[in-house]
Image (cartoon, coloured by chain):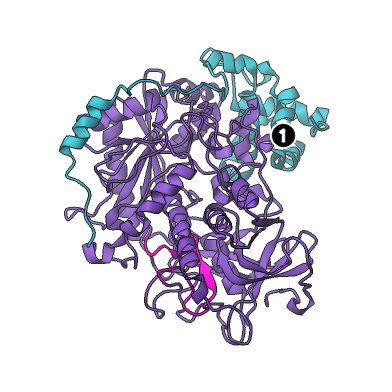
Chain colours: A cyan, B purple
Amino acid sequence: MSEPRLDASQRAVLTRLADVLIAEGHGMPSASAVDVAGSLIDRCLDAAPVLAAPLGALLEEGAPEAPEGFARRLAAERPDDFAVLSTAVVGSYYLSGEVRRLIGYPGQQPSPVSVAGEPDYLDMLERVYERYPGYREAP
Amino acid sequence: MQPVLPEVEAASPADGIGKSAADVVIVGAGASGSVAAQRLAAAGVDVVCLEQGDWAHTADYMSAEPEAELAWVQRWNPDPNVRRNLADYPLTGEADIRPVMYNGVGGGLVQWAAMWQPLLASDFKVRSLDGTADDWPIGWDDLAAHYDAVAHDLSVSGLAGDPALPEAGGYPNPPVEIGRVGRSAARGMDRLGWHWWPGANAIASRRHGSLQACQRRGTCMTGCPENAKAIPSLTHWPAALAAGARLVTGARAAQIPLDERGRAVGVVYLDADGAAHLQRASVVMLAANAVGSARLLLLSTSARFPDGLANSSGLLGRRLMQHPYRTVTAVFDEPLESWQGPWGQSIYSLEFAETHPDRDFVRGAKWMVMPHGGPMFAVAEYHEARRQHGFDALWGENFHRAAAEVFGRAFTWGIQAEDLPEDHNRVVLDPAVCDGSGLPTARIEYRMSENSRRMLDFNLARAVEAAEASGAVETLVRGVWPTGIGHVLGTARMGDDPATSVVDRHCRAHDVANLYVIDGGVFVTGGSANPTATIMANARRVADCLLRERAAVEVPG
């Protein structure tokens, strides 16, 4: 992992903004509850370094006292900047092992293919064959 | 702005890889270039291939890591304007759909979904059948044996016998399991009495050739860490290199110089340090995709060809086709494990691929079912469909609705529309923006036609019906994708008449006797099928033509 790309004050702002986007509810934790602004955002920015500079700049201007208003203005008036913030927050949130456990996501894990035996859809394919008029011949 | 071209005279034809004269120099190591290089080298032809990118190594993929979904954000995004690798050139211009591509060994196949779909027999003759666009000078029978041969080389997994296609030689592997996703979609098509068939994919369902068996990770488009998806670095280049082909990476083609008789001398390229080299060859083959090859020809101006090499017809760069694309995501109230792959086509349908007199458009669309990815994809899909509902519906505690309702419970019908050729859709040189080597980049001028809009609207409505017949409790409909799906076709049209085409039926330029274009640029029309099968089959056909007729090819003196 590379050097952390955000300082402490930027992480504090991110924590508040992230909770505006992902609050606790529906049996799921908030962004801050899984510490999105900690190691998860570092992993996210390592994976997608293109986010680091614009996110850092956003966090420099994000008013800590009014995170909700700031996030709403971004969404309404600066969609490209909001996309940077939301991608970073959502991407980091779903790196959390706790979040993955709660939604039943094991990650893109290997699951070997079985090609043994006949497929169980051959009856439906028989019907395709029976009703299809045949391909269109070319001159 | 004048193109900044290297000093050809300064190039040194010194000995060493990539510099000694070759029989054939190929520009581009992607789908078509790889096939041609392997085929020609195996026959004893001395081949040099110039590739502006590098090898994509399996270890570079992020697909086996927890961060796999984040690969889309930048490093393995299909859009060169987002990815911005050193080998990429920016694509500029105001276009309804902007092409995407990968630049490196394997080309777009590094990131393709591996859907193997030959054109329909009718696709080659749409003027004769439907009175629209133009006929190809070749037909399905000219490619049939090559489709079969390339399918074998790519270890395609599929089920022969689709009645919508001419009889073919079958596939070397049984189809990949269609999964809960495919069975669910197939049930809907069965209820409606519509065509469907298990998808054929260049993904090995069992160990075959150079490929390992698919492990269903679902990361096909950001790189298969199991080496189960066919890419030329696995399926073609080992044999080509063993047969003596030379592959030069980091070589950006800049110009095709001519001799006094108007024959191509070879290709001038710039290496990573910006130094110019001339790769001499008896035959030049362009395989840099429909954008890259057109760009190189437009860069190669001369007194004889002031508007671009091989452009006496004025059609070079024109008739760009892209397969406008929309999706319907079907959401179910039962788990489908829909993050699992492969992310090829689980099943496909050609029910609406042909012209029908009752519809207000000509030609048609191909449909294919795909899985739905991980939770980031679920959120993106949910938000795209509900953007108009406002901030509070998507964020805060409502953020979790996306994963709860869509993640793992959805599949996507992709709707791929046949895009008819129009002269105003084209690739030109950008007058102001250059790539990292100082060469003018490609500007895309593309407007989607009314025919394509109507075609997509009709098919989207049918796909919603299909989803509901499958038992979907909800459907999420997306607009036209503003970045394409990597299908770039038709900028160097094939034809018999030099006044209305750039290359002849053997893909040899009408204007330059030893210059060939072998990528998707030669497509006369695009069909609705994923084009890679046809691009590769045609490249193999052209290579065989060259082998048969090479004695007759005029070469520089």
Instruction: In this rendered view, identify the residue nearer to me: B451 or B26.
Output: B26
Vertical position of residue A64 compared to residue B38: above or below: above
Magenta span main SS: loop
User: How many marks do you count on the picture?
Assistant: 1
Can I make out residue A93 in this image? yes
Reading the image, the residue beneath label 1 is A45
Q: Quadrant of residue B496?
A: bottom left
Instruction: In this rendered view, identify the residue nearer to me: B183 or B471.
Output: B183
Q: Residue at x 56, y 42 (%)?
A: A76
Q: Residue B124: x and y, percent?
A: 31, 60
Vertical position of residue B76 compared to residue B283: above or below: above
Vertical position of residue B374 compared to residue B317: above or below: above
Q: Chain of mark 1?
A: A
Q: Is residue B488 magenta?
A: no
Q: Residue at x 66, y 42 (%)?
A: B75
Question: Considering the numbered disc 1 on the image, is that residue within a helix, a strand or a loop?
Answer: helix
Q: Residue B500: x and y, percent?
A: 39, 77
Vertical position of residue B477 compared to residue B283: above or below: above
Q: Residue B4: x and y, percent?
A: 72, 74
Q: Quadrant of residue B93?
A: bottom right
Determine crowd level at label 1: few under 14, some 14-19, many 20+ residues with C-alpha closer than 10 A. Answer: many
- Quadrant that contains the C terminus of chain B: bottom right
- Quadrant that contains the N terminus of chain B: bottom right
Q: Is residue B523 magenta?
A: yes
Can I make out residue B390 in this image? no
What are the residue bounds of the magenta stretch?
B504-525
Q: What kind of residue is marked 1?
A: Leu
Q: Residue at x 37, y 78 (%)?
A: B497
Q: Residue B94: x and y, percent?
A: 53, 61
